[in-house]
Image: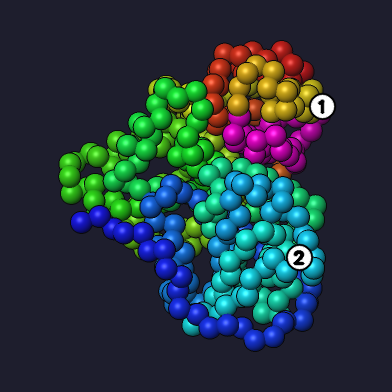
Amino acid sequence: MEHEEDEEPPLAVQIQGNDESVSHQSSVGVTLITGYLGAGKSTLVNHILNSKHGKRIAVILNEFGEEIGVERAMINEGEKGALVEEWVELANGCICCTVKHSLVQALEQLVQRKERLDHILLETTGLANPAPLASVLWLDEQLESEVKLDSIVTVVDAKNLRFQLDEHRGSSSSPEAYFQIAFADIIILNKVDLVSAESSGALEELEEEIHNINTLAEIIHSVRCQIDLSKILNRQAYDTARATHLETLLEESRSLSTEKVHDSGVRTICICETQTIDIDKTRIWLEEILWEKKYDMDVYRCKGVLSVQNSDQLHTLQAVRELYEIVPARMWEKEEKRMNKIVFIGHNLKEDILMKSFRDRATC
């Protein structure tokens, strides 16, 4: 029997009064939870809100859909807007609210609460594509000092994933299932018990299907989303100080480019180059690809390590859609082989053009 998605909110009691604002020394991590309808997002949220994990986690259940638009959702409309619903406190110390319009206002209220929060989860039911929210949470000046994007977690239904992907093969546009996998840092492959009982090797085939879209994503198996929270919280996927984690991801496979291209055109490409780069030229090259779509490629995510001319520092590159960041991360070791290694995840990617244009336009 297949698991049913539990859409009912957990039992809660209303918080009385408003907390005084206080200053916090460090930012609070925000994890975006996304996934296809019925995959298990609500089950995961309820697991977090009802488990005895000893953490104060705030969960924001959004109800701002595509019809309102992300731009409207990110506007702080102030006291007159009155758009944030009442916060409710749960028995395990977590708090929860539903936001219909202003996510910024909800986040600002959260970080100003008297009780220090350990983490914030944002369940993105109303938005098929998590990229716009991820971009704002990652580098938005209004929020950057208070909250930070920790990671994007996508819940997928092991039983129905193949059908959801096959349904749109050959389509000129990428369906939401591809977007959600392509942007994910962590993928929870839920309901694995329904697949493993059917045939041996079925789960391995699903993992291969996922990695053909996004080679860098970590896959976690689950039944009813009963997972260790340490596997999805405080992953710091966008923290520039964690260059080692990014390097490990890039080194886990000698060839991260996926041989097989989905009919949807979504794939992973990896380019490597030993010549040092000119950082200004590299920015221009990236902006032509990300902003101007010069080569008719649609890049969803981009991660890399760079060897910069006249610099003894390893630089990291991260990009979400049009937004990107290149920052120094650590010193190169004396015996270390310096190399540029960049992974692209997106639609209609052309490996030969990426490699040639990088050599011609970015290297010294």
For label 2, the crowd category at 10 Å Cα-Cα, with few meaning under 14, some 14 to 19 and many 20 or more, is: few
Residue type beneath disc 2: Gly
Q: Observer-nearest residue: 100 or 285?
A: 100
Magenta region, mostly helix, strand or loop? strand
- At x 55%, y 21%, the residue is 349
Q: Is residue 254 above or below residue 137?
A: above
Residue type beneath disc 1: Asp
Residue on which disc 2 sits:
81
Residue on which disc 1 sits:
280
Residue 237 in the image: x percent, y percent?
Answer: 59, 49
Query: Helix, strand, or loop for circle 1?
Result: helix
- At x 64%, y 27%, the residue is 340
Residue 45 in the image: x percent, y percent?
Answer: 46, 64
**Magenta-highlighted residues:** 299-328
The answer to whether the residues at label 2 and label 1 have Cβ atoms under 8 Å apart is: no
Measured Cα–Cα span from mark 2 to mark 1? 43 Å
